[in-house]
Image (tube, rainbow, N blue to C red):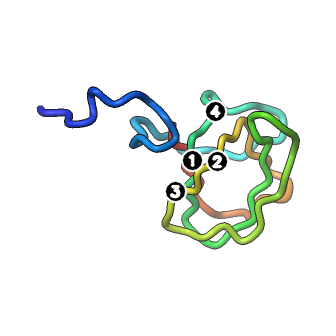
Amino acid sequence: MVDTFSSHTDSVTSPVSNAFVITPDDASDLSFVTRGLYVSANADVVVDMNDSGTVTLHNLTPGMLHPLRVRRVYQTGTTPGITIVGAY
């Protein structure tokens, strides 16, 4: 298989290579710091940003990758019943 991006360095502007489903958890950090978050529906998502504190991201638009460096997604305050995917 040809990988046309194999020579690109990982950066904010390069395509993501990995993704994982996030289960919001008030007590645990994610396995990987994200480069982006995807949500399946309009949602409020409470996160710890990688280099700062906790913030509520109100009304995230579904169906797009939001360029966010997140290390934790909280259950408390996050809209229930949505799918959240972390990309890195």
Mark 1 or 2, nearer chain start: 1
Circles 2 and 3 in contact, beta carbons < 8 Å: no
Q: Quadrant of residue 54?
A: top right
Q: Is residue 3 shown left or right of residue 72?
A: left
Q: Position of residue 71 (x, y in %)?
A: 71, 35
Callout 2 crowding tier (Cα within 10 Å): few <14, some 14–19, many ≥20: some
CA separation in Å, label 2 and label 3? 9 Å
Mark 4 or 2, nearer chain start: 4
Q: Position of residue 20 (x, y in %)?
A: 51, 40
Q: Quadrant of residue 10?
A: top left
CA separation in Å, label 3 and label 4? 15 Å
Amino acid type of disc 1?
Gly
Circles 3 and 1 in contact, beta carbons < 8 Å: yes
Please name the residue that numbered disc 1 is placed on. Answer: 36
Please name the residue that numbered disc 4 is placed on. Answer: 33
Please name the residue that numbered disc 3 is placed on. Answer: 65
- What label sits on residue 79 in the rendered view? none
Residue at x 57% of width, y 47% of height: 36
Circles 3 and 4 in contact, beta carbons < 8 Å: no
Amino acid type of disc 2?
Leu
CA separation in Å, label 1 and label 2? 5 Å
Circles 1 and 2 in contact, beta carbons < 8 Å: yes
- The correct choice, above or below, for 53 with respect to 8 in the image is below
CA separation in Å, label 1 and label 4? 9 Å
Considering the numbered disc 1 on the image, is that residue within a helix, a strand or a loop?
A: strand
Mark 3 or 1, nearer chain start: 1
Please name the residue that numbered disc 2 is placed on. Answer: 68
Residue at x 55% of width, y 65% of height: 40
Amino acid type of disc 3?
Leu
Considering the numbered disc 4 on the image, is that residue within a helix, a strand or a loop?
A: loop
